[in-house]
Image: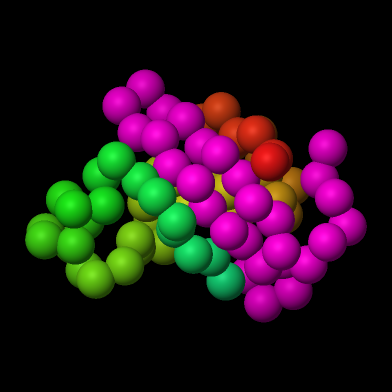
Amino acid sequence: MISDLKTVKLSVSLKNTRALVLFEKETKNYRVIDCNRKSFCRIYVSRNCPPYCEIIVAVKDFVLKRRKPKAEVVEL
C-alpha cells in the first residue's frame, strides 16, 4: 500500500537488476539511491538513470497506478 507521504522510498527488483529509488509524488521526480547497473548507465547512457529505464518505469507505474508494474516493487 502506498503511503500518503510526498516522498516514497521503494525497492525494485527485476531478474538482473535491483535498485532503491526515492520518488516524489507531486513533482514526479525520482532519485536512484543504489542500482547494480548504475555504472553501466553512467558510462553508456547518461549521467543519471534515463526515464525509459525499466526500473524507473516500474516505479512510476506503481506510484501513479498507471498499470501493473513488470518488476517487483516494494515500499520501504
Which residue sits at x=67%, y=67%? 24
Residue visible at 40% across and 35% down in the picture: 18
Give the quadrant of residue 49: bottom left
Residue 40: x and y, percent? 16, 50
**Above or below: residue 40 compared with residue 16:** below
Question: Taking 66 as reference, is 41 left or right?
Answer: left
Q: In this view, does 42 lie to the left or right of 54?
A: left
Image coordinates of residue 35 in percent, x first then y, are 35, 46
Residue 39: x and y, percent? 18, 53
Image: 4 above or below 66: below
Task: Identify which residue, 11 or 15, lies in the foreground.
Answer: 11
Q: In the rendered image, is residue 66 in sight?
A: no
Q: What colour scheme governs how the chains and residues are painted in the rendered image of this protein?
A: rainbow
Relative to 15, 30 lies left or right: right
Residue 43 appears left or right of 67: left
- Quarter occupied by residue 15: top left
Q: Looking at the image, which is closer to me, 8 or 27?
A: 8
Q: Position of residue 3 (x, y in %)?
A: 85, 50
In reply to whether residue 15 is colored magenta, the answer given is yes
Residue at the far left: name it.
43
Q: Is residue 33 magenta?
A: no
**Quadrant location of the C terminus?**
top right
Residue 33 visible here = yes
Quadrant of the snapshot with the N terminus: top right
Residue furthest out toward the bottom: 27
Number of dots carrying numbers: 0
What range is drawn magenta here? 1-28
Look at the picture and state if 63 lies above or below 30.
Answer: above
Q: Residue at x 70, y 56 (%)?
A: 8
The residue drawn where x is 19% and y is 62% is 42
Which residue is outermost to the top? 15
